[in-house]
Image (cartoon, helix red, strand yellow):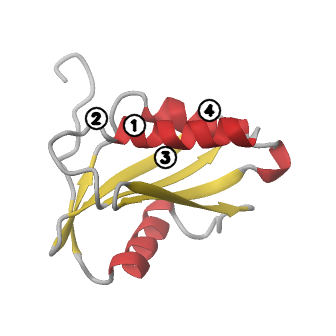
Amino acid sequence: MESEVGTLLNEVGNVLAQDADYPLDGTFLYVEADWGWVDMMIFKDLGDHLLARWPMNGLADVLAELWEAEVPAKRWSSMQYRIEGGAFSASFTHGQLDPEESTLDRRHRILQQRYGNKRVDYPPLRRRGPDA
């Protein structure tokens, strides 16, 4: 089980490396997951500010596999995944997340703890539908 988790954590980094528009170093991924859903956002540390990036194809699938690879009693509710100096580190939160705090509020709080008051530039909303 642990080797499967390690392989999937490496695969998360491989998928994040598909974003060739920005360096992989300084990438931060915040994820929340539960049965049937994964919510995530990628941030690039560009020095004076953070750039939020939309997840690339395949990332949600790898993250769902990673979540499901854990024994049910040890499944995480959120993950912080950081790439720095060519290596990744991942930390997990277990147990129920505060239902009074939204995912957006949690993400903002975590970014503030990690990066202080750095400005975050978000991409425009994606259009969905036949014209997208």
Residue 23 versus residue 1 in the image, above or below: below
Q: CA distance from mark 3 to mark 4?
A: 14 Å
Q: Position of residue 127 (x, y in %)?
A: 22, 32
Q: Marks 1 and 4, Cα distance to the nearest angstrom? A: 15 Å
Label 4 packing within 10 angstroms: few (<14), some (14-19), many (20+): some
Q: Secondary structure at mark 2?
A: loop
Near mark 1 (Cα within 10 A), the count class, few <14, some 14-19 or many ≥20, is: few
Closest to the observer: 119 or 115?
115
Tell me the kind of residue under disc 1: Asn
Amino acid type, callout 4: Glu
| Residue type indicated by callout 3 | Asp
Q: Earlier in the sequence, mark 2 or mark 4?
A: 2
Which numbered marker is on residue 39? 3
Q: Secondary structure at mark 3?
A: strand
Q: Is residue 131 left or right of residue 96?
A: left
Q: Residue at x 38, y 35 (%)?
A: 15
Q: Mark 2 — residue? A: 18
Pointer 1 with pointer 4, Cβ within 8 A: no
Helix, strand or loop at label 1? It is helix
Percent across and percent down for residue 110 are 45, 72
The x and y percentages for residue 57 are 36, 28
Which residue lies at the image location 17% right of the left edge and 49% below the top edge?
22
The residue identified by callout 1 is: 14
Residue occupied by mark 4: 65
Coordinates of residue 43 in the picture (x, y in percent)? 30, 58
